Image: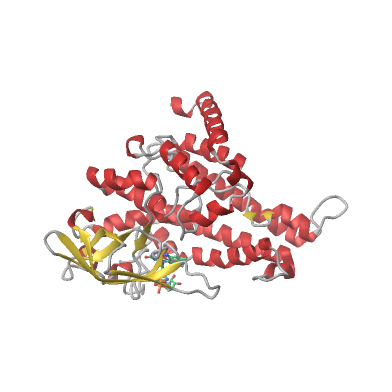
Amino acid sequence: MADFGRDHLEAFRLEAREWLEANYPASLRADPAPLNAWLGGGQKATGDVDLWRQRMGEKGWGVPTWPKQYGGGGLTPAEARVLWEEMGRIGAINPIGGMGVIMFGPTLLEYGTEAQIMEHIPRIARAEVRWCQGYSEPNAGSDLASLQTKAEDKGDHWLINGQKIWTSGAQYADMCFCLVRTDPRAKKHEGISFIMIPMHQPGVDPRPIRLINDSSPFCETFFTDAKAPKENLVGPLNGGWTVGKRLLQHERQGISGAGGGANRPMMAGGPLNEMAVRYVGVEDDGRLADADLRARLTDHLMEAKAFALTGRRAALEDRNNRGPSASSSILKNVGSKVRCDSAELALEIMGHQGVGWGGEDFNADEVAIVRTWLGGKAGTIAGGSYEVQNNIISKRILNLPDQPHANAHTPGGKQHA
Ligand SMILES: Cc1cc2nc3c(=O)[nH]c(=O)nc-3n(C[C@H](O)[C@H](O)[C@H](O)COP(=O)(O)OP(=O)(O)OC[C@H]3O[C@@H](n4cnc5c(N)ncnc54)[C@H](O)[C@@H]3O)c2cc1C
């Protein structure tokens, strides 16, 4: 294919390099903190952060492989890879992200009507609208199909009542893609629909859940006579399970970090191997001064590299942009394990300096590592737990039979991709 030819990609590399040099604001190059803070949620983009958001939005390169007619970049996966490399070269961070890009957009492109796509996708491509995910409920996590939040057909709108939980970023979101029960009499998987709910209305109440570190990355979200226009149903009525499962594959692929991942595990303190040299020291021959750590670090670096290359291969093989499959569960589990192992090794390398939480005695890198270590554990649960991904792998990929005494809810849940 011409698009994958070396000459073509090298020409594209020069084009991308030139554009990025001209358009990535110098202030963000010097200090990306305001951009990272904006991506973390909460505030409106201002100044150079907003300028960069607008430029990338107009170019479509924040969502490089989405179709051009919907505001994407229209690039092939190979071109997108070159773009990420060129952005990495100058430390440019993509300002277009979040659940709209990783999960909802690709799902809507597949299941939405032309009118829904035209309304929502360009605004996601320009990061004008923030989305959150209304899946989990207090009694429906792994067993997601037990969800009870209901939507009633009121002629010109849906009336929604119920409670979601762990809704990441709901307090900042403009829209929620939500799984709701539309037929309480049907079998549990067959009475669910996928609906887009506007967040800014009196019937929606996102209550931030305060964590031990005082941050609130997610909410309990209460719907009390909330409304959504009838045209906000995505896919068939009572056919939301299929749409919802597809979205989970995108979520898992996104969480895994496959495709955009670095080749070397990078912590706040820099690449792991460089941190090890700094904290542990070297022998006369230049080798790391701790033989056992050296061996485990080498194993880990090889595993991380193999994972990065596998993710890259998966992206390149997907030339028709079909998107992730059940194998996203493998990538999610391996990716979250690699991240947990990186953080674990970083803590070990730093010794007692790796237990900082705040205050003057610790520098920002040390504090960030503890948070990365804790956050890595959350990554093994979000998007469907480690065990549930293993269930999907055994059933959908290895074709193994169900366990005889499996959880009574086994046919449901985030486990089914
Ligand atoms: C950081 C983070 C962000 C999140 N963001 C969102 C969000 O934005 N929107 C949203 O809807 N949800 C979100 N979630 C919720 C997430 O999807 C659920 O936590 C997850 O699906 C697990 O459900 P649960 O917490 O109810 O645990 P449970 O389902 O109660 O599971 C408890 C334990 O039992 C195990 N288990 C359950 N069933 C089986 C089985 N059949 N076989 C083997 N083991 C099993 C699980 O692996 C787990 O260890 C988020 C979670 C985290 C951690």
Direction from residue 329 to residue 276 in the image, left or right: right
Residue 173 visible to the viewer:
yes
Q: Nearer the viewer, residue 10 or 320?
A: 10
Q: Residue at x 26, y 70 (%)?
A: 149
- Toward the front, the furthest residue is 47
Q: Quadrant of ligand 1?
A: bottom left
Percent x, y for residue 349? 72, 63
Side of 240 relative to 414 (left or right) = left
Residue 343 location (% of width, % of height):
62, 62
Q: Is residue 181 above or below residue 30?
A: below
The residue lying toward the viewer, choosing from 191 and 128, is 128
Kindly indicate the quadrant of the structure image that contains residue 150: bottom left
The image shows residue 63, relative to residue 33, as above or below, that is above
Farthest-out residue, left:
155
Total labels drawn = 0
Quadrant holding the N terminus: top left
Q: Estimate the x, y position of residue 18 in percent, counting from the top left.
A: 56, 30
Looking at the rendered image, the quarter that the C terminus falls into is bottom left
Spot occupied by residue 230 in the image (x, y as percentages of width and height): 18, 57
| Residue at point 46%, 61% (across, down) | 42
Q: Is residue 326 in view from this perspective?
A: no
